[in-house]
Amino acid sequence: MSRIPSLRIGGLSRRDFLKICTIATATMGLPVEMVEKVAAAVKSSERPPVIWLHFMECTGCTESLLRSSHPPLARLILELISLEYHETLMAGAGAQAEEALKAALKKYEGRYICVVEGGISTKDGGIYCQIGGRTALEIMREVGEKAGAVIAIGTCASFGGVQAAAPNPTGAVGVSQVIHRPVINIPGCPPNPYNFLSTVLYILTFGHPPELDELSRPKFAYGRRIHDHCERRPHFDEGRFVESFGDPAHQKGYCLYKVGCKGPVTYSNCSVVRFCDVGAWPVGSGHPCMGCTEPNFWDRMSPFYEHLPKIYIPAGGGIRAEAEKVGKVAVGAAAAVVAAHAAAGVIKKAVKSVSGQKSSEE
Amino acid sequence: MTKKGKEILYRRVFVWSWALRVFHWSFALSCAVLLLTGIYIHYPPITTKWAEFKPQYLMATLRYYHFAAAYVFMAAVAVRLYLLFFGNRYERFTDFLPINRRNLRSLWQSLKFYLYLTDDHEWRMGHTVLAGTIYFLLFLAAIVMSLTGLYMLYPDVSWISKMGVALFGSVQMARFIHYILHWCFIFFVIVHLYIAIWNDFKAPEAIISGAFSGSKFMPADVKED
Ligand code: HEM
Ligand code: HEM
Ligand code: SF4
Ligand code: SF4
């Protein structure tokens, strides 16, 4: 489109533009020959109208997308799409904003991409999250049903996020739980902006959504295990582990498995695409992966510095026993019972042989 | 009952087919390897200095043994599941689950026997119902171990990831269940070994050698009900 001049695209230099297209193409797992095709799709395709909804969240996903440390990426995303409604970025507010949403829904019905950031409250009719007097649930259903495609950005929109953590007072859930249509999940807390950009570019280039995994995450971004693409993996295989933060093993960059790294159970491309255009990622900087792209990560991946979640099971009188400890107790009890049982057998035999002398027949 | 000075004739009865015995020993050995390596995987002790001194791929090797034993384990479980339905009379689930009157009576009888409330040993060709029920629960645990293990090992295989998400939700939950259930196996091994030895003392059935030879001994005049 003519809105993107051939040399300076959305204020980007051609060099930056091609660089971003190349990273995005690589993120999609496509060969370098495809860069041209992706770049062409960016330039030629109609800018898809986007309605961006915010629900229960911290706006961290938007913030990380706009990160000023590498503005070219955000600029490209904002040039690539035609943002019709975005509470954080748009100028209008109040009734004016509501009007804008209504107008966009009407004008682009069935064509717009609905991007959702944040979880949705479902308890008590969803009254815990309301915008302009309407519940998030209601807005989501209306905007979601009329959209051409729905993308859930961030772990909150994908799986409920922090507000869905136990005891989940507001009944928060992810988008796919409240609308009856396929949703593309881009989880992460926050997700890597490249995963969002690449998903949108994929749709523009090929005209259909990328291949998704069982949890509706694009396979190109969430198809690999952190642990299998981690630079500390040789230390894991060798059995060289950090025992506590700051110890000599930590200083030498050994594996973070024993300080709770969730890399072995987490699917994301963090170790490959990395963050903020400076090649950084948590494990690289000495912090264990927290498993932020997985469902229920606040409940299941915490304590973040331990290997397994602490799941409580009721054990009499309202006392909560750690499920893990029950196992240890049961095995200890088994050993004790076995010993007591053997002793009882010996005693019984002794008693019987004494009394057996008296009444010789049974 | 056996009494001093009185001779009792025993007959040898064949109970366990070769398939069941192969199952038993491959299951027992693979369980031992899986437990030892699994405990290391769960909490590798401080070997860092040692591993710096001499590279040896400790974790990689033990994981490899875990997975190799896991295949033996899963094959053994598959054989046992087949025998539950198509094995000989004593190997089928109908012989040792508390699903009819005869078996319920046996369950009560073994409970009394183990609590030293009676000395009447129950002459059964196959498992007692108490033992059989525990074995059955262990087979169920073994299936869950295999499914959670497969999900951790091959999350990229389409049917496995479908199964994993449907049953466990996420790999972390599968890992948690896999870990919690490993206690059942430790528990079982302790009790099982004790009970096998205890029974060998209490009754001259020769059940332990039966686990190798397939046959047990019963008093010639006792008929199984
Ligand atoms: C040296 C060690 C062992 C000995 C002497 C032994 C002995 C026996 C004997 C005598 C039986 C038949 C008991 C009956 O009639 O009820 C049996 C059954 C069984 N044992 Fe073991 N056992 C050993 C180790 C293990 C281990 C380590 C496991 C697994 C954790 C195991 C799992 C089983 C199972 C599942 C059965 C039921 C067989 C069936 O019907 O499928 N055993 N064992
Ligand atoms: C009696 C049977 C088994 C026992 C007692 C056992 C025990 C364990 C234990 C204690 C762990 C460590 C869990 C943790 O805290 O992370 C583990 C990990 C694992 N097991 Fe098993 N396991 C058994 C069977 C299997 C089977 C049948 C499979 C596979 C097909 C399997 C595959 C795995 C895998 C993939 C891991 C994760 C290894 C890793 O994170 O590096 N296990 N097992
Ligand atoms: S640091 Fe984490 S992801 Fe990396 S090898 Fe160790 S356990 Fe795996
Ligand atoms: S390394 Fe783990 S915790 Fe960190 S962003 Fe990636 S998936 Fe989330």
Image: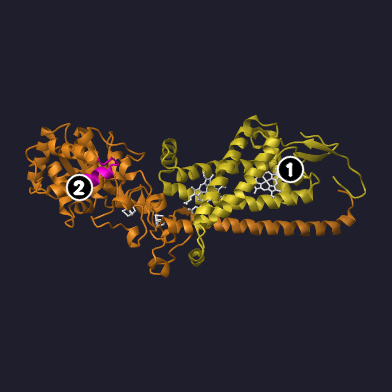
Chain colours: A orange, B yellow
User: Image height check: is B152 above or below A105?
Assistant: below
User: Image height check: is B106 above or below A156?
Assistant: above
Residue A27 is a magenta residue = yes
| A107 to the left or right of B146 | left
Measuring from the top left, give residue A159's x and y in whole percent: 32, 45
Taking depth in this image into account, of A282 and B210 the one nearest to the observer is A282
Label 2, label 1: how many angstroms apart (C-alpha)? 67 Å
Q: Which residue is identified by label 2? A: A20
Taking depth in this image into account, of A246 and A24 the one nearest to the observer is A24
Q: Residue at x 41, y 70 (%)?
A: A248
Q: Secondary structure at mark 1?
A: helix
Residue A182 is a magenta residue = no
Q: Residue at x 64, y 37 (%)?
A: B97
Q: Chain of mark 1?
A: B
Measuring from the top left, give residue B56's x and y in whole percent: 52, 59
Q: Which residue is identified by label 1? A: B212
Taking depth in this image into account, of A256 and B172 the one nearest to the observer is A256
Q: Is residue B224 visible?
A: yes
Measuring from the top left, give residue A28's x and y in whole percent: 28, 42
Q: In the rendered structure, which amino acid carries the disc numbered 1?
A: Phe
| A87 to the left or right of B40 | left
Q: Is residue A318 visible?
A: no
Q: Which residues are magenta?
A: A19-32
Q: In the rendered structure, which amino acid carries the disc numbered 2?
A: Ile
In the rendered image, residues at marks 2 and 1 fall on the same chain:
no
Q: Residue at x 31, y 42 (%)?
A: A220
- Dominant SS of magenta comes to helix
